Amino acid sequence: MSKIGHQPEGVRPPSLVPPPLAALFSLLIPGLGQVLARSIRRGLIIFFSYITILGLMIWRFRLAAPRDTGWLNIFKKALKLDNLLLSATILFALLLLWIAWDAYQIARHRERTPVGVFFMIILVFFALGWQIGQIDLVAMVAQMDEAGPPLARVLWPWEKAIEREEETVQAFADIQVPCVGEPPAVNQVSGDEPTLVATPTCGELSTQGGEPGTTLHLEGYNFSPDNPVAIKWKDPLGNVFRQRQSGEYVVVTPDADGHFAIDIVMPYRLLPPSADEPFYIWKVFGEQVASVGPAHLSKDFKLVVEKMIETIFIGMMATFFGVILAVPVSFIAARNLMSASPITLVIYYLMRGILNVIRSIEPLIWAIIAVIVVGLGPFAGILALTLHSIAALGKLYSEAIESIDPGPIEAIQATGATWLQTVVYAVIPQIIPPFVSFTIYRWDINIRMSTVIGFVGGGGIGFLLAQYIRLLDYRSAGMAVWFIAITVAILDYVSAEIRARFV
Amino acid sequence: MLEVRHLTKVYDDGTVALKDVSFTVEDGEFLVVIGLSGSGKSTLLRCINRLIDPTEGEIIWNGVDITKLQGEELRKMRRQIGMIFQHFNLVRRSTVITNVLSGRLGYTPQWKSLFGQFTREDKEKAMQALRRLGIEDQAHKLARELSGGQQQRVGVARALMQEPKMILADEPVASLDPVLAHSIMQYLEMLNQEDGLTVICSLHYLDLVQRYATRVIGLRDGRLVYQGSREDIRAMTDEEFKNIYGEEAERVSGGLQGELQSTRGGEA
Ligand SMILES: Nc1ncnc2c1ncn2[C@@H]1O[C@H](COP(=O)(O)OP(=O)(O)OP(=O)(O)O)[C@@H](O)[C@H]1O
Ligand SMILES: [Mg+2]
C-alpha cells in the first residue's frame, strides 16, 4: 500500500529525525513522527483522526459494558459481547502500527507521499460506523420471513377495499336442566330458516368437581356454508357465554349445504341458588356472522381516498400560496434589481439570509411548529409547505431573474417602448420558462411532502398511514401506500409533460 | 442632420468613455465608427438614442436636442431610430414574428400591445420585412432556433418595422462569418442608398469599412482622433493608423484587406 503514492508538488525538506525515531514518536503520539519529518499537515490530520477514533472507541466500549467498572473489565467484557467491537479494535491496533510505518516512510523518502494510512483511517471509521449503526445483516435476512405476511398485506391490500354488510345469524335450541318430567320438544327443520337441533333436549351440567355433564348432539341446518359457527350458551339469567371443549372455544364450519354436526359436553356454570323452580331452561345456540347484500367499497378504502384528495390539495394550496408569495420575494432577492443603492442591497442580503434560513429547516419541522400554532390538521401542513416553498421558489426565481439577458431589454427600449411594454416583451418571456419549470418542480415536491407531513400531524394521508401502521392494520396501510405511489407516478408523468411543453 | 457637440460620458465608476466628441452626420450618410475595443464606440451609439444618458454635451437631430428629451418625447424620438446589435438582442424564447412586431411597440397603444394586439397592417408589414430579408419561412419559429445570420436579419427586420429615419448598428457583423457579414452589410447599404436612411455603424473589419462607409470617424480612449471620407481611409497613413489603434498596432497586408481585430494591441 505504501508504494501507492503520487508526486507531491514539491519535495519536502529533510526530516528532523531519523526514520526509526519518527516511527517511534508516531507510536507514542500518532502523527508526531510525521510532524517531525516536516510533514506537518499530514501529521495533524493523522493525529486528529486518531484522537477522534479513540474517543469513539471509548464511548462504544462503555456503552457495550455499562455495568462494569475499571477499564480493563470494561474492555474484556465488551470484546466478549461484541464481535464488531473486536474487529474494530484489531483494525485500530493495526492503524497505530501503520501510522508508525507511515512516519518511517515519510521521514525516509522525501519525495514520496504514501496514501495507505488514509485508507486505513477510513477503514477504521467504516468499522466503527458499522458498529454504531447497529448494522445487522443476519437479522435482516433471518427476520425476512416474519415480515412476509404483513408485507404481503401491504403489497396486495385490496381485499380490504371491498366489504359487505354483516348480519348475525343465531339458531337456538332449549335444554331443560335437569331432566324432569316432559323435556322440551326437539326443533324441527322448516324451510330454509337456520335451525339448531339438539338431542337430547335435557341434561345435567358438568360439576365443579370435574364430573362431565350430559353430552349433547347438535346438528345445524341452513347455516351459511363454509362460514364458521360459534357454539354459545344463554343461561336462565340471560347471560351469554361460549362453549369450550378442552380449553378451546367450539367453532364448527358448516358444509356446502349449510349443515354441521357436533357433540358437546354441557358446561359447568354456577348459578345463584333459586327457590322452588324444579328446572331451568337453558338455551344452546349456534351463531354465525354472515355477509349479506351486495359488495361495496369499504370504510377504510373511502377514508384513504378522502385523505388522498386532501393530500393533493394540501400540496396544491401550498404551491399556490408559495408561488404567489415567492414572486414578489424573488424580486427583492434578485441582485441585479437590488444593486442600485446601498439600502436596497442591504434588503437584498437580508432577504437572501431569511430565505436561506427558512429553506434549511425541513418542512417536517416546520409542520411540527405549525401544528403547535394552528393545531392538528391540513392547515398546519399547508402552512409548513407554503413557508418552505416561498423560500425555495424565492431563491430559484430570483436566480432566474438574475440570469436574464439585458440585451433584449435594451433592444425593446430602443424601439420606443414604454416601461410596461419592455417588461411584457423583454423580461417576462425570459423568466416565464424557468418560473414554470421551477413551479412544477416545487408542486412535485410539495405533493410528495404532503404525503408524509401527516406523520407529524399536518393532515393528509400520512396521518392515516401512521395510524394504520400503529394499529397493525397492514391492509389499510397498504391501500394508503398504493394510493401514494399511484398519485406520485401520475404526478411525475404530468409534470414531465407540462415541462416538455413549456420549457 | 445629426450634430454631436462636445459629448462626454463618464460612467458611475468613473470610467471616461467619451471625452468631448463632436462631429456631424448629414442625412443619407453611411458613417462608420472605428476604434479599439473599449474606445467608446458602443457608448457613443447608445448616447444617440439615449440608452445611455450622456454626462455632458448636446446631440442635435433635425433641430431637436436629444439629450434633453424625456418620457413620451424620448420614446417618439427612439422609434425613429432603429438599432442593430452585435449579439442581435432578440428575445430568444419568442417567435421571430413577435420579435419583428416588437419594432412597432413605439407606435402601438400600450394596452393593446400588452395582449399582443398588433394591427393587421403591422402584421403584413412584418411579413413583408421578413420577405425582404429572405426569411419569411422562419416567421413562426422561435428566435433561438435560427442561425446567427438569420437572427441578425430578424434584428434588421425589427429595426425596419420602426420605419426609422436613422439606423444605429453596433458592430452588427462582429459575430458573423465574412460571407454573412457582407450580406448584412449589403442590406444596410441598400437601406442607406434606396431608402435614404442615415446609417451610423461601428465596425471592426477594415475591408468592410472601405467597402461600405461614406465617412469614417475614429475613436481612441473616448476621443475623436480621426475623421475622413472613404477615400481618406484608403489613403490612410501609418501615422494616422497608429493614432487610432495605438503605437503597438501593426497593419496587416497593407491595410487593404486587413482585419483590424488582428492588430488590436496587447490582446494577441
Ligand atoms: N456600464 C458601464 N459601466 C462602467 N464602465 C463602462 C460601462 N460600459 C462601458 N464601460 C467602459 O467604457 C469604455 C468604453 O466602452 P464601450 O463599450 O463603449 O467600448 P467599445 O468601443 O464599444 O468596445 P468594444 O469594441 O469592445 O465593444 C470601456 O472602458 C468600458 O470598460
Ligand atoms: Mg461595443
Image: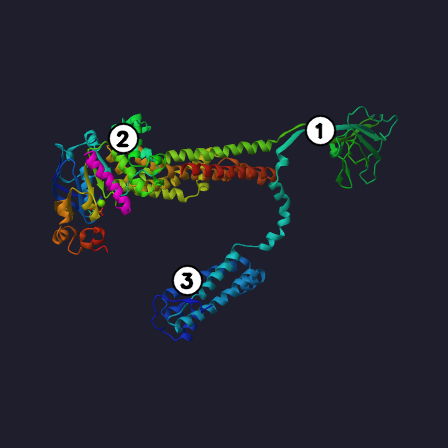
Packing grade of label 2 (10 A; few <14, some 14-19, many >=20) is: many
Query: Which residue bears the numbered disc 2?
Result: B105
Q: Which residues are magenta?
A: B174-197
Say which residue appears at 60% left-offset and 31% top-offset. Answer: A299
Q: Is B193 or A75 nearer to us in this picture?
A: B193
Packing grade of label 3 (10 A; few <14, some 14-19, many >=20) is: few
Q: Is B240 or A448 nearer to us in this picture?
A: B240
Q: Is residue B162 magenta?
A: no
Q: Position of residue A76 (x, y in %)?
A: 56, 64
Asked if the beta carbon under badge 1 is closer than 8 A to the nearest atom of ligand 1, the reply is no
| Subunit under mark 3 | A
Query: Which residue bears the numbered disc 1?
Result: A168
Say which residue appears at 50% left-offset and 57% top-offset. Answer: A129
The first of marks 1 and 3 along the sequence is 3
Residue type at mark 1: give it: Thr
Tell me which corner region of the image, top left, top right, bottom left or bottom right, holds residue A162. Answer: top right
Q: Are marks 2 and 1 on the same chain?
A: no
Instruction: Measure how far apart labels 3 and 2 are at the Cα level.
Output: 68 Å
Q: Report the label total.
A: 3
Query: Which residue bears the numbered disc 3?
Result: A48
Instruction: Measure how far apart labels 1 and 3 are at the Cα level.
Output: 74 Å
Q: Position of residue A280 (x, y in %)?
A: 81, 28
Under circle 2, the secondary element is helix
Q: Is A189 or A29 nearer to us in this picture?
A: A189
Could you tell me if residue A88 is visible in this image?
yes
Residue type at mark 2: give it: Leu
